């Protein structure tokens, strides 16, 4: 086991691509490369050698750069078994419960369907890093395109296993919009109010709000609080199941 150095590359209007570097060598992996050019330029600038792509799901803003990156570097492409036909050039298929070894680091893989049916997440426990693609966002969660609300709720519930000190490396800078919605449904949460203020200051300064800390998300992200009776009560849903509460919050966000 060993820890990885993580470097964030902003791409497109609001995507985040991540480079994971093994500190003892010049080797690096890239998570969800939307585009090849910014990734290859960054590798060049740092003098790092790309060995792997880790993909979370088939959307173009996550794997659009894969063919060109593979052609340029000859790297190994790791991706969801369930999406083998939708993601170009997968060499290594991974699925729920697998442990994927990247250099000396180990990632636990979860199937997290809902946003897409084949979506997976990678948790590098020792690096305290969760790469969750479009499943969980800072103060939000992904839209449910290819699954049911119940599936999406079960998917984000898998993240209960990760400690509070884990950094949530989601794939988009959606935090400001998510904060406005979170405050709309949970207006009296003082920790959320403080977090939203901090987010606003960071965005005004042009600074990334990602990654966020799982512990803070657990106390402020309404989608992670669907099983909290206090939030159900605020929503007028006393006694409803966490899945029902989650579905209600997700539906309200879709229409916000
Ligand atoms: Zn997506
Ligand atoms: Fe996306």
Image (tube, helix red, strand yellow):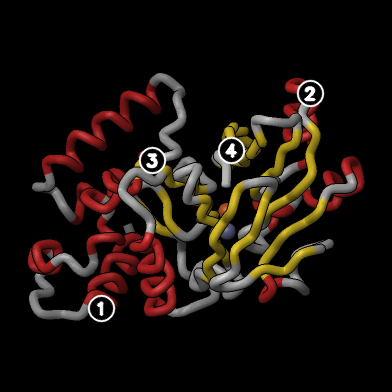
Q: Residues within 10 Å of mark 2 (few under 14, many from 20)?
A: few
Identify the secondary structure beneath mark 4. strand
- Using the numbered discs, state the Cα–Cα distance from disc 1 to disc 3 in whole angstroms: 26 Å
The answer to whether any part of residue 145 appears in the image is no
Identify the secondary structure beneath mark 1. helix
Q: Nearer the viewer, residue 138 or 187?
A: 138
Mark nearest the camera among 1 and 4 is 4
The answer to whether any part of residue 202 appears in the image is yes
Q: Residues within 10 Å of mark 1 (few under 14, many from 20)?
A: some
The verdict on label 3 being within 8 Å of ligand 2 is: no
Q: With 97 as the anchor, is 39 left or right in this view?
A: right
The reply to whether the C-beta atoms of the residues labelled 2 and 3 are less than 8 Å apart is no
Q: Which residue is mark 3?
A: 212
Quarter of the picture holding the C terminus: bottom left
* Residue 204: x %, y % from top left: 38, 23
Q: Which residue is mark 2?
A: 47
Tell me which label, 1 or 3, sits earlier in the chain: 3
The reply to whether the C-beta atoms of the residues labelled 2 and 1 are less than 8 Å apart is no
Mark nearest the camera among 4 and 3 is 4
Q: Residues within 10 Å of mark 4 (few under 14, many from 20)?
A: many
Mark nearest the camera among 1 and 3 is 3
Identify the secondary structure beneath mark 3. strand
Compared to 4, does 70 lie above or below?
below
Q: Residues within 10 Å of mark 3 (few under 14, many from 20)?
A: some
Q: Which residue is mark 1?
A: 244
- Using the numbered discs, state the Cα–Cα distance from disc 4 to disc 3 in whole angstroms: 17 Å
Q: Which mark is residue 4?
A: 4
Q: With 50 as the anchor, is 123 left or right in this view?
A: left
The verdict on label 4 being within 8 Å of ligand 2 is: no
């Amino acid at each position: 086991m060993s820890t990885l150095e993580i470097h964030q590359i902003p791409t497109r209007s609001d995507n985040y691509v991540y480079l994971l570097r093994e500190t003892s060598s010049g080797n690096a992996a890239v998570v969800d490369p939307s585009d090849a050019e910014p990734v290859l330029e960054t590798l060049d600038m740092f003098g790092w050698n790309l060995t792997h792509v880790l993909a979370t799901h088939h959307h173009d803003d996550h794997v659009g750069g894969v063919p060109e990156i593979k052609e340029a570097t000859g790297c190994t492409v790791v991706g969801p078994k369930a999406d083998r036909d939708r993601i170009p050039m997968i060499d290594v298929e991974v699925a729920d419960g697998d442990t994927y070894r990247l250099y000396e680091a180990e990632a636990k893989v979860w199937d997290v369907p809902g946003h897409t049916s084949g979506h997976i997440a990678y948790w590098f426990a020792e690096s305290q890093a969760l790469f969750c693609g479009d499943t969980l966002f800072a103060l939000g969660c992904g839209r449910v395109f290819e699954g049911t609300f119940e599936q999406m709720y079960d998917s984000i519930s898998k993240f209960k296993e990760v400690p509070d000190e884990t950094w949530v490396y989601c794939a988009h800078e959606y935090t400001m919009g998510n904060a406005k919605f979170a405050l709309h449904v949970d207006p009296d949460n003082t920790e959320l109010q403080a977090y939203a203020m901090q987010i606003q200051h960071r965005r005004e300064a042009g600074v990334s709000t990602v990654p966020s800390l799982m512990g803070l998300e657990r106390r402020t992200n309404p989608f992670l609080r669907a099983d909290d009776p206090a939030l159900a009560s605020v929503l007028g849903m006393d006694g409803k199941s966490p899945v029902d509460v989650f579905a209600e919050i997700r539906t309200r966000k879709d229409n916000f």
